[in-house]
Image (cartoon, grey):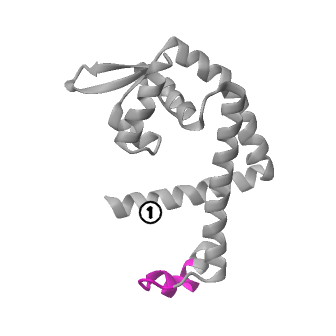
Amino acid sequence: MSASTSTQQSSGAQLDAVGAQLDAVELGAWRGFLRAHARLTRELDAELVAAHGLPLTSYEVLLFLDDAPGRRLRMAQLADSVLLSPSGLTRLVDRLEKAGLVRRESCPSDRRGFEAVITDEGRAALTGARPTHLSGVRRRFLEHFSTGDMRTMSEYFDRVLHHSADEAG
């Protein structure tokens, strides 16, 4: 029996019970994840704003657009990618458009929809901010783990995401 199977079986009754309290280990894991995510996001955002005037959410939008085919994405797809509501993404794209970092274009396959497209200025901003962001990710997060730890963590996150996708679909 694997360690994960044993863990799942030992806490299975608590996990199956609707509204059951989390035990100390479960609560520590959950709260630790939330605190680490909140702190890292806040610190990485502050670094990008201080060095480049670019918030983390803007950096992520530019990154997803730069990586997309044709350097463009439909607004709904971009909102899902950066974990923003459609209205939240609209406001963010409005600001990025005013700054000249993205532009909106009608979607060729559906004239009612719009795509966000990264501009040359947006690519330059992303290129300038990337070393700051990657250095921060390494220093604040990755350097605390071995390569094996990171592989294991990736497997854990994949497991959670796969299970969540199964429940949603």
Report the residue marked by disc 1. Answer: 163
Image point (67%, 25%), residue name: 52
* Residue 160 higher or lower than 74, as above or below: below
Left or right: 136 in relation to 153: right
* Residue 115 higher or lower than 148, as above or below: above
Element at label 1: helix
Image point (50%, 19%), residue name: 99
- Quarter of the image containing the N terminus? bottom right
Horizontal and vertical percent position of residue 137: 71, 41
Magenta: main secondary structure equals helix
Horizontal and vertical percent position of residue 46: 68, 39
Image point (59%, 56%), residue name: 155
Q: How packed is label 1: few (under 14 Cα within 10 Å), some, or many (20 or more)?
A: few
Left or right: 57 in relation to 39: left
Horizontal and vertical percent position of residue 158: 53, 55
- Quarter of the image containing the C terminus? bottom left
Magenta span = 8-20
Residue lying farthest to the top in this orientation: 120
Left or right: 139 in relation to 95: right
Three-letter code, disc 1:
His
Q: Is 76 inside the magenta-drawn segment?
A: no
Choose between 8 and 93: the one closer to the eye: 93
